[in-house]
Image: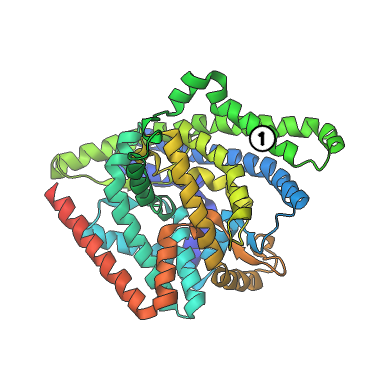
C-alpha cells in the first residue's frame, strides 16, 4: 500500500490529474475526448504553476539570502520550505498510510451524509501527514499521530462544506468546487472576525478598494505587474551592501524586478487553465446529481487552492507582505523563525480570506498581517518536535539534501506549521494530553453533527 501511494504521489498532480479527471468525467457521462481535454487543461495548469513558482523561488531566494547575510537576520529555526516539509511528512509511518486512511474517512462521512466534499486533492494530503508526523514523534505513538491527522482531516472537510458557497460566489468559474486544505481553511475564522471588527474602526470602514479600484485610483502603480517590478527592484537594492555593489548589480536588480513582475502577470493567466478544465466536470456533476437525487442535493469536488491564487488582490497583498514578513520575523519578541523558502507560498494564505473581505485590499492585508504574526510563533513553538521528524527522515534518506537540517538549527516551515488548525491540535495534545484529546474529539463530533443537520435542512 505504501509503495502504491508513494508511486502516485511521485507522479505529481500534473500527471495524475488528467488521469483522475478523465476517469471521473467518463463516469459522470462526459464523452472521453472532452473529459481527457478537461484533465489535460488542469494538468497543464499545474505544470505552468510549478514553473512560475520555481521562477519566483529561484529569483527571490538568493536576493533574500543576501539580505539576511548583510543585516545579520539569521534566527534559530531554519525554513525548510513546503517541498521539504511535505517530504518529511510523507516519509514517516503516519505519512505512508495517510492517503488510504483519509480517503476511507472521507467515504464514511459521505455515506453518513456528514459532508458534501470529495477531496481528490491528494497532493495536499501532506498537511494531514505533517501534523500526524509531528504528534507521532512528540508522543512516540502511532495512534496519537493518526488521531491528530484524522481530526485535522474531518475538521477541514466540514470547513470546506461550510465555505463552499462563499468560495464559489466570490471566485468565478468555481461552481461545484470546495477547498479542503487545512492551511487555507485555518485562516477563514480570522477573516470573518477581523473583517467584522474592522466595520467598527473609523476610517478603515470607509475604505473599500479592491484590485480593480486600485487600478482606477493609482493607475499603473495599482497594477500587480508594476508592483511586482517595484518590490523586486527594492529587494534587489536591499541585497547590496554598499553603493559600489548596488551599481555593479544593476542588471541583476532590474532582472529581479522583471521576474517578479512576470510572476504577478503570468499566474492569473495560468490559473485560468484550471477554470477551463474544471467547468465541464463541475457542470456535468451538478446535472447528474440533480437528475438522480433532486435539485437540493449537491456534491463538491475538493480541489487545490492553486486554482484561484491568481486573483489580483491575492497577488498584490501577498507581494506587499513578503518584505513585511521579514521585518515581523526580526522584531517580534520570542520569534525564532525567519521565513525564506516558504515565502513563495504566501499566495495561499488569502484563498479563503478574500471571499470574506470581498477582495478588499486593505482588509485582506490586515488579516494577513495578523495571521502571519501568529503563524511565526506557531512555527517557533512546533519547531522542536518537527525537528525530530526531520532528523528521522534525514537519517533514513542521507542523500536527500532537502530534508537535512543545518547543524545548530531547528526545522520549520511557514506552510501549514503556521496554520491555526495545526497548532490547535498540537497544543491540545502537547499541553493537556488526554484532556486535550477529549476536547478535540468532542468538538469534532459536534462539528460533524452540526454539518449533517445543516446539510439535511438544505
Where is mark 1, residue-wise?
232
> Between residues 313 and 172, which one lies in front from this camera angle?
313
Q: Is residue 129 left or right of residue 81?
A: left
| Snapshot colouring | rainbow
313 in relation to 64, above or below: above
**Image position of 393 (left or right of 187):** right
Picture coordinates of residue 428, whole percent (x, y): 39, 72
Identified at 27% across, 49% down, the residue is 162
Q: From the top left corner, tell me how far across and down residue 379 is, in percent.
A: 54, 61
Give 258 or 364, whichever is nearer the viewer. 364
Q: Is residue 249 visible?
A: yes
Which of 73 and 49 lies nearest the eye of the viewer?
73
Q: Quadrant of residue 206?
A: top left
The residue positioned 69% from the left and 40% from the top of the image is 59
Q: Give me the residue at 15% from left, 56% from top.
A: 453
Residue shown at 48% from the left, 25% from the top: 214
How many residues crowd around disc 1 within 10 Å: few (fewer than 14), some, or many (20 or more)?
many
- Looking at the image, the residue that sits furthest to the right is 244
Q: In the image, residue 454 lies at what x, y percent?
A: 17, 52
The one of 311 and 336 positioned closer to us in this rendering = 336
Q: Is residue 41 visible?
A: no
Secondary structure state at the residue bearing disc 1: helix
Question: Quadrant location of residue 277?
Answer: top left
Q: Quadrant of the N terminus?
A: bottom left
- Percent across and percent down for residue 264 are 56, 32
The vertical placement of 177 against 421, above or below, is: above
Amino acid at each position: 500500500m505504501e509503495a502504491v501511494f508513494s508511486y502516485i504521489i511521485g507522479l505529481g498532480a500534473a500527471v495524475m490529474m488528467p488521469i483522475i479527471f478523465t476517469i471521473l468525467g467518463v463516469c459522470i457521462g462526459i464523452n472521453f475526448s472532452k473529459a481527457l481535454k478537461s484533465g489535460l487543461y488542469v494538468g497543464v495548469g499545474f505544470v505552468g504553476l510549478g514553473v512560475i513558482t520555481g521562477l519566483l523561488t529561484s529569483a527571490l531566494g538568493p536576493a533574500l539570502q543576501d539580505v539576511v547575510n548583510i543585516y545579520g537576520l539569521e534566527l534559530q529555526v531554519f525554513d525548510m520550505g513546503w517541498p521539504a516539509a511535505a517530504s518529511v511528512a510523507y516519509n514517516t509511518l503516519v505519512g505512508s498510510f495517510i492517503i488510504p486512511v483519509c480517503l476511507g474517512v472521507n467515504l464514511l462521512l459521505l455515506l453518513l451524509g456528514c459532508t458534501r466534499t470529495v477531496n481528490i486533492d491528494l497532493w495536499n494530503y501532506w498537511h494531514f501527514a505533517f501534523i500526524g508526523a509531528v504528534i507521532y514523534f512528540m508522543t512516540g505513538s502511532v495512534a496519537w499521530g493518526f488521531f491528530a491527522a484524522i481530526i485535522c482531516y474531518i475538521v477541514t472537510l466540514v470547513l470546506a462544506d461550510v465555505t463552499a458557497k462563499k468560495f464559489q460566489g466570490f471566485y468565478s468559474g468555481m461552481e461545484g468546487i470546495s477547498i479542503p486544505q487545512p492551511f487555507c481553511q485555518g485562516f477563514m475564522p480570522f477573516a470573518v472576525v477581523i473583517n467584522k471588527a474592522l466595520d467598527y474602526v473609523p476610517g478603515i470602514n470607509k475604505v473599500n478598494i479592491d484590485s480593480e479600484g486600485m487600478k482606477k485610483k493609482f493607475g499603473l502603480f495599482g497594477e500587480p505587474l508594476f508592483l511586482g517590478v517595484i518590490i523586486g527592484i527594492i529587494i534587489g537594492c536591499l541585497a547590496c551592501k554598499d553603493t559600489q555593489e548596488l551599481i555593479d548589480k544593476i542588471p541583476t536588480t532590474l532582472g529581479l524586478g522583471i521576474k517578479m513582475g512576470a510572476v504577478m502577470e503570468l499566474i492569473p493567466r495560468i490559473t485560468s487553465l484550471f477554470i477551463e478544465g474544471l467547468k465541464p466536470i463541475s457542470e456535468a456533476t451538478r446535472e447528474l446529481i440533480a437528475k438522480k437525487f433532486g435539485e437540493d442535493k449537491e456534491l463538491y469536488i475538493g480541489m487545490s487552492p492553486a486554482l484561484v491564487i491568481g486573483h489580483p488582490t491575492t497577488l498584490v497583498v501577498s507581494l506587499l507582505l513578503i518584505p513585511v514578513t521579514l521585518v515581523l520575523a526580526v522584531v517580534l519578541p520570542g520569534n525564532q523563525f525567519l521565513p525564506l523558502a516558504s515565502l513563495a507560498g504566501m499566495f495561499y494564505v488569502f484563498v479563503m480570506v478574500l471571499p470574506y473581505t470581498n477582495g478588499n485590499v486593505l482588509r485582506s492585508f490586515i488579516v494577513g498581517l495578523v495571521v502571519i504574526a501568529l503563524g511565526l510563533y506557531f512555527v517557533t513553538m512546533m519547531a522542536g518536535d518537527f525537528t525530530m521528524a526531520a532528523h528521522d527522515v534525514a537519517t533514513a534518506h542521507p542523500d536527500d539534501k532537502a530534508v537535512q537540517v543545518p547543524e545548530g538549527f531547528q526545522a520549520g516551515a511557514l506552510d501549514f506549521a503556521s496554520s491555526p488548525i495545526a497548532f490547535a491540535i498540537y497544543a491540545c495534545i502537547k499541553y493537556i494530553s488526554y484532556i486535550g484529546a477529549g476536547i478535540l474529539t468532542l468538538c469534532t463530533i459536534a462539528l460533524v453533527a452540526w454539518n449533517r443537520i445543516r446539510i439535511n435542512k438544505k
